[in-house]
Amino acid sequence: MDILSETIGAIRTGRPASGLFIRHAPWGRRYPKVPGAGFHVVLQGSCWLLPPGGEPVALGAGDVLFMPRGEDHDLVDALGTPISEIAEPGEPREIVGPGARTALVCGAYELGRHRGHPLLDDLPEFIHLPARPGRHPALRSAVDLLAAETAEPRPGTDAAIPALLDTLLLFMLRAWFDEQSTAPTGWAGAFGDPAVSEALRAIHAAPQRAWTVPELSAVAGVSRATLARRFLATVGEPPLSYLTRWRMLTAARLLRETDIPLASVARKVGYQSEFAFAKAFKRQYGSAPGRYRRADEQLADLAV
């Protein structure tokens, strides 16, 4: 069971979106907060990130910037340049000017409503992945392919770009966790801890099972106390609390992506009673499973 892929699959909704934006200095661009995750890839030139309340960050060609919770921010060609535009649908792809040319691919990922996952909650608001030689070659390759498809659309581009964006998301997260591989806490620590990883894989593989801490610790090959301590330090919550979270995320995904009966959804996430499942789901998502499914279908219809 691939924990990272399963987690991204559970919290992702809809199709990712992206676009190529070219600006000539001087330029300043505001990006409002988005209900999901956002990213920028600098294809050519350079710019500065101005995070709210934080220090400016220099971005160069090949750099990737990831916003796990879609935080608002500004990008400018140089420090001191005023903000002259706000990112919005339908804006021009290129605005010419007298100064240096900067090209960026900017995009966003839709994430599940109401209920997050500690993997993303644990991340900083801004993740800067500089284009260092020899570092994260898979991410660099994904960036190059996305840049080529975006700059010169060809037959099949409409199918290629969403697939590349999905790959880019995984590679951005993988690159970040690789950078934090020695961290003793957080999800980087969870991936690096064999016992915690085994317990997570067991939960992800069989959320319908009535797991107990002794059973999970036997799978992990450590004592109950050791697993409980290391799980809390890395994942951020006790094993059985995470089991409930994963059950609800799995249920929400099944409600969004399938039309199987609610009773079947309940059984797949460990509830023999549809009433007990509905009560637990409403406690986490604020609405009954049937209403959640209908609301998601209505959003999908509006998107079309």
Image (cartoon, rainbow, N blue to C red):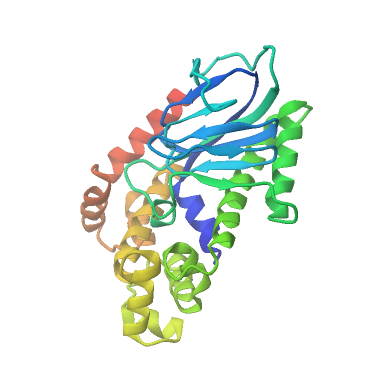
Q: x%, y% of residue 22?
A: 66, 21
Q: Which residue corresponds to the image point at 29% horizontal and 65% vertical from the top-left?
A: 241
Q: Which residue corresponds to the image point at 52% horizontal and 34% vertical from the top-left?
A: 49
Compared with residue 26, is residue 117 higher up or lower down, i.e. above or below?
below
Q: Which quadrant holds residue 26? A: top right
Q: Which quadrant holds residue 214? A: bottom left
Q: x%, y% of residue 95?
A: 64, 13
Q: Is residue 82 left or right of residue 163?
A: left
Compared with residue 303, is residue 2 higher up or lower down, i.e. above or below?
below
Look at the image and tell me whether residue 270 can be seen.
no
Q: x%, y% of residue 59?
A: 61, 38
Q: Quadrant of the N terminus?
A: bottom right
Q: Is residue 253 left or right of residue 103?
A: left
Look at the image and tell me whether residue 19 can be seen.
yes
User: Exactly how many numbered labels are in the figure?
Assistant: 0
Q: Which residue corresponds to the image point at 38% horizontal and 37% vertical from the top-left?
A: 53
Q: Nearer the viewer, residue 76 or 270?
A: 76
Q: x%, y% of residue 28?
A: 53, 21
Compared with residue 218, is residue 151 higher up or lower down, i.e. above or below?
above
